Structures are given as C-alpha cells and as structure tokens.
Amino acid sequence: MRVFSLSFLFSIIFLFFSSVFLQNITFALSVGDTKTFKVSAYYSPLAGQEKYVSGSYAADLRMNGNGTHGADGTPVYVGMISAPYTYDFGTKIYLPGLGIGTVHDRGGAIYAGKGYDRLDIWMGYGDEGRIRAINWGMQMVEGKIVASNTSEGFVFGGKKITTNTSSVQNEDDEMFSVPLSIDAYGKKQEIAKMQKFLQSQGFFHVKSYGYFGPITEKAVLDFQIEHEIVQTQYDFGAGVWGPKTRRVANKILKGEFVKRKTVITSYSFSKNLWRGKNDMERSEVKKMQKFLKDAGFYNGTISGKFNAVTEKAVFNFQVSKNIINNLNQKGAGVWGPLTRKMAEGK
C-alpha cells in the first residue's frame, strides 16, 4: 500500500481549491478589450445636508464611508473607480453613460460576477454627490479598457465634470465652500474667513482667530436661527457650517439674499415675561410671539407658552439690538423693560 506524505496531501488539497477559486476570477483586461460591468455608485455624506439616503448622516456614513482616499492613496474625486483586486491601479475604463474613469480603489465587496465585473464609482460629497449616486443607481454597461494616457472626464445630467481634482466637495466659485464644525483642525484660514463674515453680520463679537470653538459654534447657531436654517440648538446640523448655511452666506455676499424686516407692525408691551411664567400671561406671550415672528426671530406656533424656542427667539432679538451679548448675561432670554422698549421701537 502506497503511503502519501502529509505535505503531498496538503499540496493536492491546495491545488484543488486554487483551481476552483481561479475559475471565479476575471483577470484584468488589456487596452481595447471590452467587458460587461455592473456599475454601482456611492457618495460621502456631510453633516447638515438636505437629505440622506438612509435617513440620517450617521447611517449614510456607515454605508458609504468618509470618502478621503482610494486604496492607492489617491484623494477621492468624482469618477474614481473601485474595481476587483485583479485590476491594476491606474487602469482606465470607458463606461457608456458616464465617461472615462481610473481605478484607484479596490475592495472585497467589489468582485467579479458571472459574466461581469463589479465597479463602484465615487460621485462626490453631500447633496450633490447623493443626487448623482441616486440618479445613476446600478446599471449594467459594456465598457472598454482605454490607454493610460487617455484624458478622464465624466458627464452627469448633461454637464461635463473634469475629474483630475479631489476638491469636488467645494462649491465652484463660492466664497464659502468648506464644511466646518467645532474642533475642526487644519482649516484655520477657512475658519477665520467664516468668523469675519459672522462678525460683519453681527453674530461673532470677538476678533477672528481661526479656531472653531464654542464661541464660534454659538455664532454659527445664531446665524442659522436668524435665517431659519435651524430652529433650536438641538436640531440636526445646528452650529455646523454645512451646505445650507454656506449657501445662505454665499447668497448674502452676492447680494441675492433679502434680509427680513426687523419690525412690521407697531406693538405695545407692558409686562415682564420669562420662561416658566404661569399661564395667566398667555395673551401677553402670544403678542410677544407674534412680534418676534413678524420680526423674523420666531418660527414656532403662536401658543402663548413661553417655552425654550420662545426664550431663544427673545435672546436672538436681544443680541440683534445689542441689549446682551451672550447667554450668561443677566436678563438673557427675559422679556424685560429694555427688551420691550426696543420691540416698541422707542
């Protein structure tokens, strides 16, 4: 009886499984070759954008990732391709309906299927990237490998996008294009620019210094509440220099934003009011809420209840009239004599 060594048996087993595994691998194609591709699209979410595919920033972030670099270290850009492991980095592929992109990323979820290869295309940051990704979805196309010196270029919605830059998350030709939030690092110049803008609008009361701390977050929040981007500090995106906030700021700089009037009708107030005051003053609170709503500081219902939203509206009105500068000052959020006098236009 023939006795097989253990190493020989392992070699046989290895060759068997290797042959089965290799049957499922599609090797990279040569220039001029065509291939069926199953092409999906993804994007990288930003805090404060208008909508999310999965319903929230956190869920979209888990699904799509931050979007910083491909596996070869290349910063992400619109049109970057993630391909199966068998594709060399730098391989350029023409995809009908999209254009020409380059492989800079590879991953386990991007595989070779039966009769096709999977590709995943990065579509950008925020709402712009989300819309592109949704509009493309997942499609089967007959693609072609092109020469490495072929220029890249993708088309979305009839608009050609040059893909040789990683700064796609920035809005073109806008003063404010970079998302910022508390404790942001490495963006001192952008933060200082934002602070100077908020200072010019009356929301930032210290010298700009390029650090996004609690004072800056509060200034951003006040700007957002003033322009109805958020209603309270608890709203999603509150205190974040996100897409909606930057869009309003850019419109103001261009002179496209019409600022609301401070007072629309004349009012007369006779009672001090504050949060938690009993319901005996509901008619006075309603009148105050109506004034604050007309003046653009209150977005809630005329309920007659002096709640947190109403207190915040009073505070923002006080800041706009230089009655107080911060929440720690005595009388902040209180409908007192000086606040009432300012409301009456005296």
Image (cartoon, grey):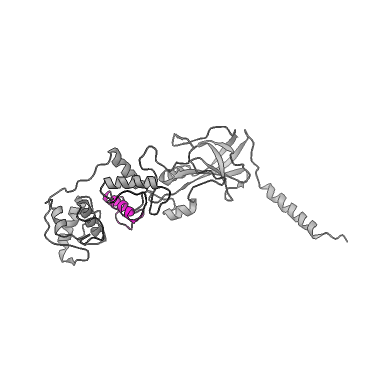
Which residue sits furthest right? Answer: 1
For the point 56% across and 32% down, the residue is 150
| Residue 135 higher or lower than 297, as above or below | above
* Residue placed most toward the observer, 298 or 246: 246
Residue 301 appears in the figure:
no
Is residue 215 left or right of 298 when viewed as pictured?
A: right
Q: Position of residue 107 (x, y in %)?
A: 58, 49
For the point 31% across and 45% down, the residue is 196
For the point 70% across and 50% down, the residue is 20
* Residue placed most toward the observer, 97 or 295: 295
| Residue 223 higher or lower than 253, as above or below | below
For the point 23% across and 58% down, the residue is 310
Q: Position of residue 163 (x, y in %)?
A: 49, 37
Is residue 205 left or right of 41 when viewed as pictured?
A: left
* Residue placed most toward the observer, 238 or 326: 326
Is residue 95 left or right of 5 when viewed as pictured?
A: left
221 is within the stretch colored magenta? yes
204 is within the stretch colored magenta? no
Q: Position of residue 52 (x, y in %)?
A: 41, 50
Is residue 72 left or right of 210 when viewed as pictured?
A: right
- Magenta region: which residues? 213-237
| Residue 126 higher or lower than 172, as above or below | below
Q: Quadrant of the N terminus?
A: bottom right
Q: Position of residue 265 (x, y in %)?
A: 14, 49
Query: Based on the displayed image, in which of its 4 quarters is residue 287 positioned?
Result: bottom left
Number of callouts in the render?
0
